[in-house]
Amino acid sequence: MKKLYCLLFVMLLPCLPGIAQPATRTLRLQEVIALAQEQSAAARQAETSRENSYWQWRSFKSDYKPQLSLTGTLPDFSRTIMPVTQPDGTTDFKPVSINNSELGLSLSQVVSPTGGRVFVTSLMQRFDDFDREQTRYNGNPAIVGIEQPLFAYNQLSWAKKIEPLRYQESQKVYLEERESIAVNATRLFFDLLLAQTNQRIASQNQSSNDTLYQIAQEKYKLGRLSKNDLLQLRLAVLNAELAMAQATLDEQTAALALKTYIGMKETDQLELTPPEGIPATTVLAEVALAEARKNRKESINFSRRLLEAEALMAKAHGDNGFNASLFATFGLTNRGASFTDIYTRPENQQRARIGFSMPIMDWGRQRSIYKVAELNKQLVQYTVDQEDANFEQAVRTQVNKYNTLKARIATTAEADAIAEERYEIARNTFLIGRISITDLNIALAEKDRARRAHIASLSEFWMAHYTLRQLTLYDFEQGQVIEMSE
C-alpha cells in the first residue's frame, strides 16, 4: 500500500494547488535530432575530435614546408682555475675568465621523394678572454649542405601517402558520429513518445473504468449485474490507477533521459508529435552498397591500413642492417678580431662524409623481421577482406530491414484504427448488457496493444532510417550525399 500511495502522489503532485505548472514545448523528431546534433555532449565531443584531427593534419603538412630556426648560446660565461701547459712543458693552474657566445640562423627543407634534407646556415661565434682583455670572432657567413640517408626506409614518402587518408578518414568519422547522434536521439524520442502514449492510454483507461464502475454500481443495485462482475470492475479501476501512476513515472524518466542527451536545460514539459508520413523512396541494396563504399570511412580505412602494412614491409627491408648516409656542405668561413672581419674576404669551406655500418653476422635476425612484416601484411589483407564482407552484409541487412519495416507501418496503423473502433463498439455493447466484462477487457487490451504496436513500428522504422543513413552517409529522402557542413 505504501508503494501505491507513493505512485499516486507522483501522479497527483502536478495537480496540487499552489504549485506552478511548467510550460509545454512541442517537438517533432527532426527538431529533436537537430538539437542533439547542435548542443548535446556527444556533438561537442565529435566536434572536438574533428578539430583535433584538423590540427594534426596541419602539423603534418608543416613538416614538409621550409623551416626557419634561430639557435644560440648567449652567454656561456665561466670563471674557474684550469690546468695550463707552460712553454717549458710543465703544468700550472691558472685562473681563467672567459665567455663563449654563439648565434646561428638556419633554413632547411625536407626532400620527401628521397627522405633527405637540404639546408642553408649562417653561424657566428664570439670568444672573450677577460683576463687578457682579448676578443675574437669566428663565423660562417653562409653554409649550404645536404643530409641524405642511402638505401634506407623513407618515412617522409610513406607518410605523404598515409596521412592524407587518415585525415579524410577523420572527416568521415565526424559525419558518422553525427548520424550516430541522430540514431540515439531517435531512440530516446520514441522511448518518450511511447511513454507518453502509455500515459494517455492509462489516463483514458482510468477515466473509462471509473465511468463503467459507476454505471455497474447502479446496475448491481437494480440486480442486473452480478457481484463478481462488479468486483472485477472495481479491480480494473484499482489496476488503472496503478497503471496511471507508473505510466506518469515512466514518462518523467524518459523525458529526463531525452533532455539530458540533447542538452536541454529548460524545465518545460515536452509534448512529442509523431512523425507524419514516411519517405516514399524504396531503397535498393545495390545502390545503398555503392553509396556506402563511396561515402563511408571503411574504404579509406582499408586503404590506409594496407598502406601502413606495406610501409612496415618497406621499413623492414630498408632497415636491413646496412646503414649509410651522405653529409656534404659547402660554404664560407673566416675569423678576426672584429665582427666585420668575418665578412671581409672569407675563405671557402667544404666538408663531405659518407658513413656506413654493416652487420657481418646477425643469425637470421633481419630475415625474421622482414618475414614478420610480410605475414603482418597478409593478416591485414585477410582482416580487411573479412571486414569488407561484414560491412556489405550489414548494409544489405539494413536495407532489407528498412524496406520491411516501411511496409509494416501501414498494417499497424490500420490495426490501431480497427482496435480503437472495436473497443468503442464493445464498450457500448457492454453498457446495454449484451457482452461480459471479460469480452470488454479483451477489447481494451487489444486496443492498447495495437496502439503500442503502431508506435513501436514507427520507432523501429525511423531507427532503421537513420541507421541506414549512418551506414551509407547518404540521404535517400533527398537523394544526395551527406556532406560536411561549413
Image (cartoon, rainbow, N blue to C red):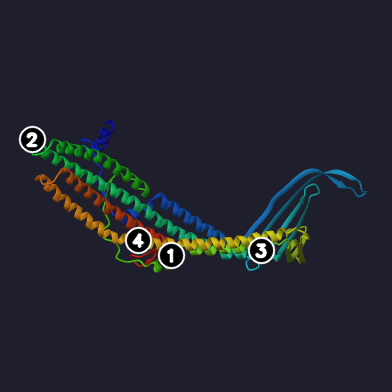
Badge 4 crowding class, 10 Å Cα cut-off, few under 14, some 14 to 19, many 20 or more, is many
Which quadrant holds the C terminus? bottom left
What amino acid is found at the position of numbered circle 1 in the picture? Ala
48 up-or-down from 315: above or below: above
Q: Earlier in the sequence, mark 2 or mark 1?
A: 2
Q: Which residue lies at the image location 23% right of the left edge and 37% below the top edge?
A: 12
Q: Earlier in the sequence, mark 4 or mark 1?
A: 1
Q: Can residue 237 be seen by looking at this rendering?
A: yes
Image marks 3 and 4: residues in contact by CB distance under 8 Å: no
Badge 2 crowding class, 10 Å Cα cut-off, few under 14, some 14 to 19, many 20 or more, is few
Of circles 1 and 3, the one toward us is 1
> Which residue does the numbered mark 2 point to in the structure image?
221
What amino acid is found at the position of numbered circle 3 in the picture? Tyr
Apparent side of residue 235 relative to residue 290 in the rendered image (left or right): left
Which of the pair 167/205 is nearer the observer?
205
The CA distance from mark 2 to mark 4 is 56 Å
The CA distance from mark 2 to mark 1 is 70 Å
Whole-percent x and y of residue 153? 66, 63
> Which residue does the numbered mark 3 point to in the structure image?
153
> Which residue does the numbered mark 1 point to in the structure image?
292
Q: Residue furthest top?
A: 2
> Which residue does the numbered mark 4 point to in the structure image?
402
What amino acid is found at the position of numbered circle 4 in the picture? Tyr
Q: Earlier in the sequence, mark 2 or mark 4?
A: 2
Q: Which residue lies at the image location 37% right of the left edge and 63% below the top edge?
A: 399
Q: Which residue lies at the image location 76% right of the left edge and 60% below the top edge?
A: 359
Of circles 2 and 1, the one toward us is 2
Q: Residue furthest right?
A: 88
The CA distance from mark 3 to mark 4 is 49 Å
The CA distance from mark 4 to mark 1 is 15 Å
110 up-or-down from 204: above or below: below
